[in-house]
Image (spheres, rainbow, N blue to C red):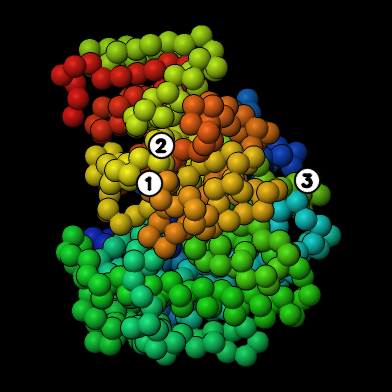
Amino acid sequence: MNILGVSGLEKAPAFKRAHWPGLEEREYRILQGQDSAAVLICDGQVVAAAAEERFTRNKHTAAFPSQAIDWCLSQAGLDPSQVDEIAHGFDYTPYRELYSLDPVSDEYYREVCSPEALLASVHAWRPGFPAEKVFSVNHHLAHAASAYYTSGWPECLTVVLDAMGEVQSISAFDCAGGKLKKLREISANHSIGILYSLVTLHLGFDFNSDEYKIMGLAPYGHPERFRKFFEGVVELRDGGSIRIPILNLNKTREDRETYAATRRFLDENLVPRRSPGAEITEEHRDIAAALQECLERVILHVCENLRDATGHSRIALAGGVALNCTANGRLMRSGLFEEVYIQPVAGDDGVALGAALYRASLAGEVDNQRFPVPLLGPASCRHDTDSALEEFRDRVDVVRFRSLDETCANAARLIAGGKVIAWHRGRMEYGARALGSRSILADPGHPEMRDRINAMVKKREAFRPFAPAVTAEQAHVWFELDEQAELPYMIAIVDVRPRHRESLPAITHVNGSARVQTVSKKDHPEFHHLLKAVGALNGREMVLNTSFNVKGQPIVNTPREAIDTFLGTGIEYLFLGNTRVSKKVGSEI
């Protein structure tokens, strides 16, 4: 079977703007159904996957992923008529009666959430596509399927940690024999993910977008000052449940749309809200630290109780909250489970994968193997590269190498010499992480490198850390990891070994941690080759690795986007496959 998984609620942003005009721009991000994506599964195998934002260049877009779908089908040489099913990672039909109680909610259901709204989006992509081939999959079931069916385990506990599905925030599944059995769920009325996002908004960042900034800010603060506040608003209950009463202060339809009453409570009982761009104070840092501590406390509480109830020694995680690398590292170090697997595309772009896998499982076609590094997006051909170079010929100089060996040797010398390079090679990453195909790379041993890249290249907040990519063979040398440990997805925090912290200033966070990506020859041979070339020069098979984009922009997709971004930043060299690009004199920013 050929199954297309899709995510996103296309009409949600327009509906919100039409019914609640005059909100702050950031309040329009308090929204369900962004990060649309498409995934193609053929006979149980994931063939192609990409987020729609990589084609539209509209970050976090909710648009129906028509361009991503078309690319996925072209990758497999398929026509839309050869698609057996389209599986969507939301199913609101069980809650139809609940939505009908309020006129605005009733309209929202019909225009945004209903099967008819989904089918209208499908038909806008391909008129006449058979309605009987379009299926809706519960959001958390899709998240859970994305984790279990890519874990490689015959049985495990699977937990979805999310802001909100249709009505849930956390769901747990007992997984065995290829089946997912729901154990329990926690309502979105008591969502730790929503609380984390609301405090993110309160601290002057964007809801449903900038939560990772709070994670990066937290180590600069001390949780003691605000620990009692968060212990008071987040109640841990017997049996692994939680309650967050302040999320239920919003009694009117208007308040519920922006959590206005909850936000007033934060104004009155925490600190006044920070405006975007205002100074980040010690108070803000301490709130971030206490919030992060609270999140970790909740996750350990929920997962420990589920372990005790099921007896499982393995846990698989997905959902937007499972992108919190610090909490993931804490869970791994806790000893609660012998093995922890976090599905690397854990956010809502990942429900496209899960919806397709779930439908494939019903047909008995899923081969549950551990998910490789998700290099499942477009690769650029020589023609695309040459066309882009021709377009920018007046602004760039070009050097072509004959082989991967020559390319890596040259790139390694530049990195070791303190240069910042961009690396655009092979298939694009599926998901939010920079996994070595669309990356900005530098030497982690240069003291000024972190501030330099934050200011001149990424154009982002100075407090945010950068991640290291290191060969799997050397990871244990530099980081507190076992010799055989692999963390290929850049999704968990570990400690840098104390004796190496001073020599790795660009990737060592203020608390001595790093978000490590281990790179193996089998999973990512070309990136591994580059790291080996770097190690041959300085003994350290490691680079600083951050996504190839600037603030507010999706990760680059095409060679043209790569060159355009390169020319607008302080990056010194760009590698497009075996071609090195530099700026002509006078073209520098």
The residue depicted at 74 percent of the width and 80 percent of the height is 308
Instruction: Say which amino acid is labelled 2.
Output: Asp
Residue 144's x, y, as percent? 65, 61
Residue 117 sits above or below residue 199 on the image:
above
Badge 3 or badge 2: first in the primary sequence: 3
Q: Which mark is residue 47?
A: none
Q: Which residue is at the far front?
A: 499
Image depth: mark 3 or mark 2 in front: 2
Instruction: Say which amino acid is labelled 1.
Output: Ala
Distance of label 1 from label 2 (alpha carbons): 8 Å
Pointer 3 and pointer 1: residues touching (CB < 8 Å)? no
From the image, tell me which residue sits under label 3.
367
Image depth: mark 3 or mark 1 in front: 1
From the image, tell me which residue sits under label 1.
506
Label 2 neighbourhood size at 10 Å, few (<14), some (14-19), many (20+)? many
Label 3 neighbourhood size at 10 Å, few (<14), some (14-19), many (20+)? some
